[in-house]
Image (spheres, rainbow, N blue to C red):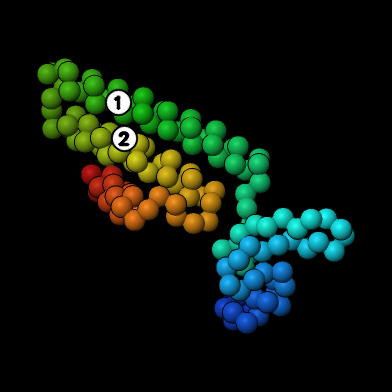
């Protein structure tokens, strides 16, 4: 059942039948202009990709901004309190502070990149940031 559902997408030559307006060379896929409208060039990196609409983008930006703000304030508070109070210097609290540092790294370096990456189809930050982002994600998850 699953193979018969996805098999048209596995055969590249059938993409032309499924998406007749798509260019296979990576040039902009122009929308149909049969009704006298000017075609709007849009880049579709692969068949089935749809650019996110305005409501989706707005909701993602608001939710990510709130999560980022809460992560920055909450984790910074934990780090600040544990590092300033000598009575809180216990192994358990240092472990919690270590988790807060890892979560702060994820918030500062990965959350906003993930937000931008989910809205555009291509990686725009360059090779160095690609490697650094993967490194920080690994350190944050295994911190």
Q: Position of residue 86 (x, y in %)?
A: 12, 18
Q: Nearer the viewer, residue 54 or 142?
A: 54
In this orientation, does residue 71 appear? yes
Q: Position of residue 39 (x, y in %)?
A: 75, 58
Q: Quadrant of residue 9?
A: bottom right
Marks 1 and 2 in Cβ contact (< 8 Å): yes
Q: What residue is rendered at 36% in x and 24% in y? A: 73
**Residue marked by disc 1:** 76
Secondary structure at badge 2 equals helix
Q: What residue is rendered at 53% in x and 51% in y? A: 120
Q: Quadrant of residue 109?
A: top left
Compared with residue 20, is residue 88 higher up or lower down, i.e. above or below?
A: above
**Residue marked by disc 2:** 104
Q: What residue is rendered at 29% in x and 50% in y? A: 132
Q: Quadrant of residue 44?
A: bottom right
First in sequence, mark 1 or 2: give its number.
1
Q: Nearer the viewer, residue 21 or 115?
A: 21
* Mark 2 surroundings: few (<14), some (14-19) or many (≥20) residues within 10 A: many
In this orientation, does residue 4 appear? no
Quarter in which the C terminus is drawn: top left
Quarter in which the N terminus is drawn: bottom right
Q: Nearer the viewer, residue 15 or 59?
A: 15
Compared with residue 81, is residue 18 higher up or lower down, i.e. above or below?
A: below
* Mark 1 surroundings: few (<14), some (14-19) or many (≥20) residues within 10 A: some
Q: Is residue 132 left or right of residue 116?
A: left
Secondary structure at badge 1 equals helix
Compared with residue 64, is residue 81 higher up or lower down, i.e. above or below?
A: above
Q: Is residue 66 left or right of residue 108?
A: right
Q: Is residue 92 left or right of residue 135?
A: left
């Amino acid at each position: 059942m699953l193979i018969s559902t996805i098999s048209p997408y596995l055969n590249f030559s059938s993409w032309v039948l499924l998406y007749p307006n798509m260019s296979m060379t990576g040039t902009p896929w122009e929308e149909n202009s049969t009704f006298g409208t000017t075609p709007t060039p849009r880049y579709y990196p692969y068949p089935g990709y749809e650019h996110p609409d305005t409501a989706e983008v707005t909701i993602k930006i608001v939710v990510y901004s709130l999560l980022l703000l809460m992560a920055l304030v909450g984790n910074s508070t934990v780090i600040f309190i544990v590092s300033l109070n000598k009575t809180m210097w216990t192994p358990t609290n240092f472990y919690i502070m270590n988790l807060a540092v890892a979560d702060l790294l994820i918030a500062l370096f990965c959350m906003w990149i993930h937000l931008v990456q989910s809205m555009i189809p291509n990686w725009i930050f360059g090779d160095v940031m690609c490697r650094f982002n993967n490194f920080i994600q690994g350190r944050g998850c295994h911190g």
